[in-house]
Image (cartoon, rainbow, N blue to C red):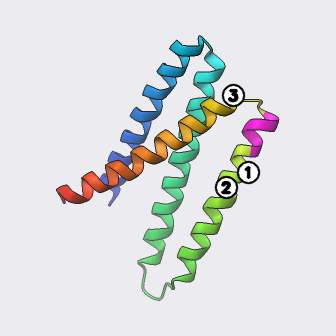
Amino acid sequence: MRKVLLRLLAIQGAATLAIAIGFYIAFDSPLAAGSVFYGGAMAAAVSLLLAWRVSRAQRPGAGVAGLYLSALERMVFVAAAFVFALFVLNLVPLALIAGFIGAEAAYYLAGSLLRRQA
């Protein structure tokens, strides 16, 4: 599972890098590129939280409640990270959202491709 997770994170990172380069070229703004990286890092953190909770749920005696808690935990994390990025760090909203959505989309696309290979 660790190998698959590393591949997924690498694909998320590559997607984030490509989007950041696009924003840097399009807007000539290091802040926009940094905002994309922050959004991509949020998506990677969500992926790591999910992997951690799934590994804990596979232990004997673990219930389904842990997975429900994981969904709530990830939603709260994403909301808090967006609020922090927008109101404390003053990042570029469009670039932030593009980085997050791009990395999340890469995660799901890569996950389906890796599942087919297995």
Query: In this view of the protein, which residue sits in the foreground, 102 or 62?
Result: 102
Identified by mark 2, the residue type is Phe
Callout 3: 10 Å neighbours few (<14), some, many (20+)?
Answer: some
Callout 2: 10 Å neighbours few (<14), some, many (20+)?
Answer: some
Identified by mark 1, the residue type is Ala
Numbered label attached to residue 77? 2
Determine whether label 2 and label 1 are within 8 Å by CB: yes
Region in magenta:
83-88
Q: Position of residue 51 (x, y in %)?
A: 45, 61
Identify which residue is drawn at 58% across, 75% down: 68
Identify which residue is drawn at 55% across, 35% down: 98
Kindly report the distance in space between the C-alpha atoms of the residues bearing marks 2 and 3.
19 Å
Identify which residue is drawn at 62% across, 16% down: 30
Q: Secondary structure at mark 2?
A: helix
Query: In this view of the protein, which residue sits in the foreground, 96 or 63?
Result: 96
Residue at the extreme left: 117
Identified by mark 3, the residue type is Val
Q: Quadrant of residue 95?
A: top right
- Residue that numbered label 1 is attached to: 80
- Residue that numbered label 3 is attached to: 92
Q: Secondary structure at mark 3?
A: loop
Q: Is residue 17 left or right of residue 24?
A: left
Q: Earlier in the sequence, mark 2 or mark 3?
A: 2
Q: Secondary structure at mark 1?
A: helix
Identify which residue is drawn at 49% across, 55% down: 48
Residue 87 lies in magenta, yes or no?
yes
Image quarter (top left, top right, bottom left or bottom right) of the C terminus: bottom left
